[in-house]
Image (cartoon, helix red, strand yellow):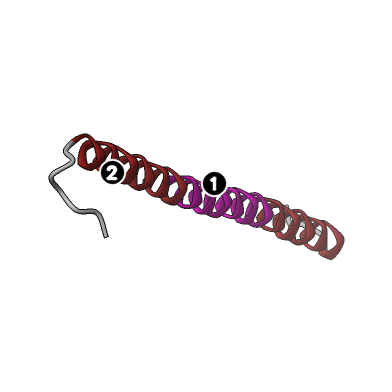
Amino acid sequence: MTKSTFAKTKAQIKSYQYYLFWGACTAAVMAGQIFVGAGYQSMSQSVKDLTEIIEIKIELEELRRDRSTIIY
């Protein structure tokens, strides 16, 4: 029992579509991961900047309480 040329071609097209579908899914997942990673990095930098500002304000308040220190 041999497959006809039409059946072989049909199987090849199905195989091509299968790999095309899963390749597109893989690319979509990777793109989503990169997007989330970039967003996390941006958020992390914003939180870091905010904590530095808070630390500076706390230090300034401590310096202002101690009047013997000169603030430049």
Whole-percent x, y for residue 66 in the image: 16, 38
- Picture layout, residue 12 above or below residue 59: below
Which amino acid, mark 2?
Answer: Leu
Q: Which residue is mark 2?
A: 60
C-alpha gap between disc 1 and disc 2: 36 Å
Whole-percent x, y for residue 28 in the image: 65, 51
Q: Is residue 37 magenta?
A: yes
Which amino acid, mark 1?
Answer: Val
Q: Is residue 44 left or right of residue 21?
A: left
Dot 2 falls on a residue whose secondary structure is helix
Q: Is residue 23 left or right of residue 38?
A: right
Residue closest to the eye, 21 or 13: 21
Q: Which residue is mark 1?
A: 36
Earlier residue among tags 1 and 2: 1
Residue closest to the eye, 35 or 7: 35
Q: Is residue 52 left or right of residue 45?
A: left
Name the residue: 79% across, 60% down: 13
Q: Residue furthest right?
A: 6
Marks 1, 2: nearer the viewer:
2
